[in-house]
Image: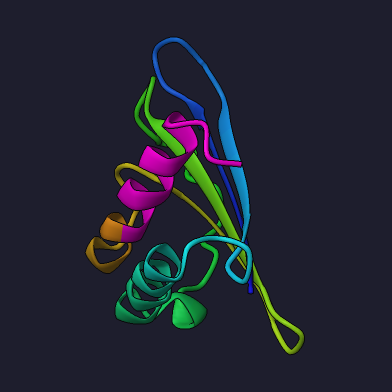
């Protein structure tokens, strides 16, 4: 399973990104990410149309998950993000900030 994550926007407009192959990271970390993906019901989240009324200076997130059988991508913001997705976004943001590539 591959995960591609990107966060853009915010006051400073700084972009952070991360690409992970869950087969190449520590097993505990991979298990945590798999659990967060499952708990978020990630594959059922639809990619909403862009929000023309979005708040200024908010973060915009892109998460793509790929396996041999699926490729699912979503775009969301701090204000439009489903609550179930927030733990996954926070974990990926933390990994991206720590420089995990």
Q: Is residue 81 above or below residue 78?
A: below
| Outermost residue, left side | 83
Q: Is residue 101 above or below residue 11?
A: below
Q: Is residue 80 something one can see in this rendering?
A: no
Q: Is residue 90 magenta?
A: yes
- Residue name at image x 43 percent, y 49 percent: 92
| Outermost residue, front side | 26
Looking at the rendering, which quadrant does residue 95 occupy?
top left
Residue 44 screen position, x and y as percent: 46, 82
User: On the rendered structure, is 9 left or right of 21?
Assistant: left
Q: For the magenta stretch, what is the residue range?
A: 88-101
Residue 8 screen position, x and y as percent: 53, 30
Q: Is residue 55 above or below residue 48?
A: above
**Quarter holding the N terminus?**
bottom right
- Residue name at image x 41 percent, y 36 percent: 53
Residue 35 screen position, x and y as percent: 34, 77
Looking at the rendering, which quadrant does residue 21 occupy?
bottom right
């Amino acid at each position: 399973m591959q995960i591609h994550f990107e966060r853009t926007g915010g006051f400073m407009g700084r972009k952070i990104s991360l690409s992970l192959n869950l087969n190449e990271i520590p097993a505990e970390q991979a298990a945590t990410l798999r659990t967060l993906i499952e708990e978020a019901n990630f594959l059922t989240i639809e990619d909403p149309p862009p929000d023309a009324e979005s708040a200024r200076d908010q973060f915009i997130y892109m998460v793509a998950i790929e396996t041999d059988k699926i490729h699912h991508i979503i775009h969301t913001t701090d204000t439009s993000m489903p609550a179930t997705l927030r733990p996954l976004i926070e974990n990926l943001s933390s990994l991206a900030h720590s420089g995990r590539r």
